[in-house]
């Protein structure tokens, strides 16, 4: 057998061995054909003449029309694969995906090798014109070897001359401060043609060009002494400007653009709430006493609406599909605009690349200039896209990112190495962010920042109209999709004895069979008509799904009582298919835990729907109860503006937070008491001593209250039981051994470990542990063996995200 045939058969075997789990999934779409094409291409790389180098072989393979045709075939095949994979892999973290899609998405994530989807996307993106680009690169390289330069690379001619005057001869440095340099040069030798962006930065196949790139564009090699470093561009800091509240949303509506039904929905919402936003801005401006606010340069990239992520929402807007995410994004955009910030909006990959200044190619190269934004708001889909197109820059700039995260991400799931080692690795999370960079729809865990959304407020005239027109025997069902009604006949029949039942279920030609005949179905209603329906109804009833959407708050704000099912046992990522793969261990006790715990009776009633007697008793109670429209302050326009303003002006994740004090000894406070904590009167909680100087903190340290949890209790629950909120920003101040002595905890020894439960102690063994990795400071963690040290704070009435002195 010839050498060529041996290489050919070896590549076939490698293809099938490497992708064995994946080929199970793609067998129906011609994976064997893909492998055959790849090996056909690979066969052309085999050595044909003694002395051929990989470089000249690539010239033969990628330069000809036949090989470009092969590349195009591979590209077409990859496109087919990606379209079918995207349907499954992109839908796993939305509020109202069907259970079937979630299950399929989880299955896909279990069988595919890590990063395979991203690699296929990167290959498919520019495969069709790859051959032409590489051919141009090769032509420049051949010209270089002949001692000539074309105009594109003329400004790089000086860097090929080293001290001895030879051209193109550069020695790879072995510097202990840059241990990865040799391996990165080896990688560049083998793969520099894999992305046109390398040639864009002057890489031409020579070791000198590799070293220049790896030292000046990336940072894996030391600066080259013979380079003229004065040519390195210096970037002046962007001037600071004052932000001024805006009252006109016309410019925002124009920026949002057109072309998608989802964008049209968001713009309709913006127009409808414009007057309320403007009024709220005036009130907030008065309360801030016109204090100076810095205008931030902000990019908002809505990843789930991009075509590259599948954009499954836009086609469903008019068919009862999920609207919760679009409600929140519309409100985020409006809040940022009203607060007066400099805003750019992206709903496509092309827009994202343009705004960031991504170099041409497939995203392997980092950005070389400063990030043109102070903040970037995106979602998990957008975060993935940024990783694909920012190269190593994402690591450098990720402190500027804020991730809009529907269900929340806890520290144990966010820390990539810890999650992988301890079984917390899921489909989402593992980005190694500060967990306060994740911003949620509801205040699930204080580890994240609560972003929220708004519900429409009523004026006095509307409140009076509701009181006059309420129909005590009218109920509206929370469920726009027919599948949500399946299996609910028993308690609907009980409800029908007392009330007329109305639905807003989408249907095209005939009544959905899942909806009983006694239900008056209005079909899918525009938002204003739905509001009118809720203003008449006495009851808004949930069936258990969708979880944690905006509709219950809107119903309560329009004077309805919300009746929802209790979950026994609580749903979580450990026992329920919908939450499986979500980066949280949160126990979901009902369809809408926020409504249950933060609002409660009489506006919210949570019962076991499987207990017919309990359900019917709740209906009778509702018939006798009268309620006023109610909306928590944090879900008003003013409440959201307060919150977003406070985050933008005070949250800073780009400057590393040093542990305090630098040494965990009493000598850190010379001339002061042996502990920085003082016991509060009539309390078991500790406060920070006022005579101890501290670095600046937000929230301010005056809000700190330190207490110990019960054994097996999380700090979320421990703080709530004391009428407080766990504050993760305070962990660095209590992660010291003096915290144990202040709480009169006996420690045989104090060790620092990487453990999301720490700082904590065990009474049984007298073991005390401090946290070694700040990314694992967690309000959510709990362990039956440990009492946790919990940094708590107070909060503003109706605004749990902010302490009393946080504005």
Image: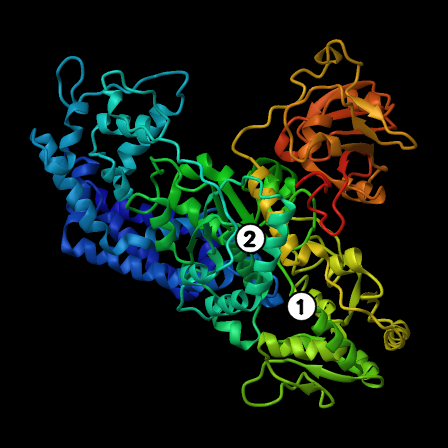
* Disc number lying in front (1 or 2): 1
Residue 628 relative to residue 534: left or right: right
Going from N to C along the chain, the mark reached first, 1 or 2, is 2
Write down the residue under mark 1. Answer: 551
Q: Secondary structure at mark 1?
A: helix
Residue 140 at x, y percent in the picture: 13, 38
Vertical placement of residue 5 versus 308, above or below? above
Viewer-proximal residue among 425 and 234: 234
| Residue at image point 16% right, 56% down | 66
Where residue 357 sits, quadrant-wise, is top left
Residue identified by numbered label 2: 110
Q: Is residue 473 above or below residue 242?
A: below
Q: Is residue 570 above or below residue 319?
A: above
Going by the image, does 476 lie left or right of 76?
Answer: right
The kind of secondary structure element at disc 2 is helix
Name the spot of residue 250 as percent of width and height, x first: 44, 62
Which residue does the image show at 70% across and 76% down from the upper left? 534
């Amino acid at each position: 057998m010839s050498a060529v045939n041996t290489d050919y058969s070896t590549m076939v075997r490698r293809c099938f061995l490497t992708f064995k789990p994946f080929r199970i999934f793609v067998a129906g779409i011609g994976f064997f054909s893909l492998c055959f094409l790849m090996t056909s291409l690979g066969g052309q790389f085999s050595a044909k003449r003694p002395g051929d180098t990989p470089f000249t072989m690539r010239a033969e393979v990628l330069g000809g029309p036949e090989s470009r045709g092969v590349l195009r075939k591979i590209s077409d095949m990859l496109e087919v694969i990606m379209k079918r994979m995207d349907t499954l892999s992109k839908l796993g973290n939305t509020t109202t995906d069907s259970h079937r899609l979630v299950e399929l998405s989880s299955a896909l994530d279990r069988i595919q090798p890590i990063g395979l989807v991203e690699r296929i996307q990167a290959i498919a993106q520019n495969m069709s014109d790859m051959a032409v680009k590489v051919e141009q690169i090769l032509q420049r390289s051949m010209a270089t070897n002949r001692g000539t330069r074309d105009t594109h690379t003329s400004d790089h001619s000086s860097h090929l001359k080293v001290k001895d005057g030879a051209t193109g001869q550069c020695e790879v440095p072995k510097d202990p401060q840059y241990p990865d340099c040799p391996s990165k040069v080896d990688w560049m030798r083998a793969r520099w043609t894999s992305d046109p962006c390398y040639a864009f930065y002057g890489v031409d196949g020579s070791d000198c060009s590799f070293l220049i790139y790896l030292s000046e564009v990336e940072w894996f090699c030391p600066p080259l002494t013979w380079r003229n470093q004065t040519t390195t561009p210096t970037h002046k800091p962007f001037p600071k400007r004052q932000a001024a509240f805006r009252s006109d949303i016309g410019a925002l509506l124009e920026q949002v653009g057109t072309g998608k039904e989802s964008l049209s929905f968001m713009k309709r919402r913006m127009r409808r709430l414009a007057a309320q936003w403007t009024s709220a801005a005036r009130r907030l401006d008065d309360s801030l006493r016109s204090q100076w606010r810095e205008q931030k340069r902000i990019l908002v990239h809505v990843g789930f609406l991009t075509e590259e992520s599948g954009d499954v929402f836009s086609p469903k807007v008019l068919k009862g599909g999920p609207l919760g995410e679009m409600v929140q994004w519309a409100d985020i955009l409006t809040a940022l605009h009203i607060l007066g910030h400099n805003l750019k909006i992206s709903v496509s990959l092309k827009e994202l690349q343009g705004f960031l200044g991504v170099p041409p190619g497939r995203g392997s190269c980092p950005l070389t200039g400063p990030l043109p934004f102070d903040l970037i708001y995106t979602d998990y889909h957008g975060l993935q896209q940024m990783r694909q197109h920012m190269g190593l820059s994402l690591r450098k700039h990720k402190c500027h990112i804020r991730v809009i995260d529907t269900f929340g991400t806890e520290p144990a799931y966010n820390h990539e190495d810890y999650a992988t080692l301890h079984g917390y690795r899921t489909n989402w999370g593992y980005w190694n962010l500060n967990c306060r960079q994740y911003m949620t729809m509801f205040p699930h865990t204080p580890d994240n920042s609560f972003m929220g959304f708004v519900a429409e407020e009523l004026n006095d005239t509307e409140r009076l109209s509701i009181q006059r027109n309420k129909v005590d025997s009218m109920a509206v069902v929370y469920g726009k999709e027919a599948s949500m009604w399946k299996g609910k006949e028993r308690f609907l029949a009980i409800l029908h004895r007392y009330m007329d039942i109305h639905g807003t279920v989408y249907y095209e030609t005939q009544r959905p069979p899942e909806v009983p005949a006694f239900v008056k179905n209005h079909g899918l209603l525009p938002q204003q008509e739905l509001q009118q329906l809720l203003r008449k109804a006495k009851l808004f009833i949930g069936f258990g799904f969708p979880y944690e959407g905006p509709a219950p708050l809107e119903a309560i704000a329009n004077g309805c009582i919300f009746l929802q099912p209790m979950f026994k046992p609580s749903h979580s990522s450990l026992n329920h298919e919908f939450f499986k793969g979500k980066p949280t261990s949160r126990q979901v006790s009902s369809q809408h835990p926020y409504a249950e715990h933060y609002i409660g009776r009489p506006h919210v009633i949570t019962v076991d729907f499987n207990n017919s007697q309990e359900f019917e008793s709740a209906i009778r109670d509702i018939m006798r109860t009268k309620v006023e429209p109610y909306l928590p302050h944090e879900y008003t326009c003013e409440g959201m503006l307060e919150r977003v303003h406070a985050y933008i002006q005070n949250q800073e994740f780009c400057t590393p937070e040093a542990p305090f004090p630098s040494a965990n000894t009493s000598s850190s406070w010379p001339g002061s008491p042996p502990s920085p904590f003082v016991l509060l009167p009539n309390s078991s909680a500790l406060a920070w001593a006022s005579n101890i100087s501290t670095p600046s903190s937000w929230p301010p340290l005056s809000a700190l209250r330190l207490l110990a949890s019960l054994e097996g209790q999380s700090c979320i629950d421990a703080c709530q039981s004391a009428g407080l909120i766990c504050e993760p920003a305070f962990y660095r101040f209590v992660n010291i051994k003096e915290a144990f002595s202040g709480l009169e905890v006996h420690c045989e020894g104090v060790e620092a470990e990487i453990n999301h439960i720490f700082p904590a102690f065990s009474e049984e063994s007298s073991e005390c542990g401090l946290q070694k990795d700040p990314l694992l400071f967690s309000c959510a963690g709990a362990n039956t063996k440990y009492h946790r040290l919990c940094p708590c704070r107070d909060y503003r009435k109706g605004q749990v995200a902010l302490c009393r002195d946080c504005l």
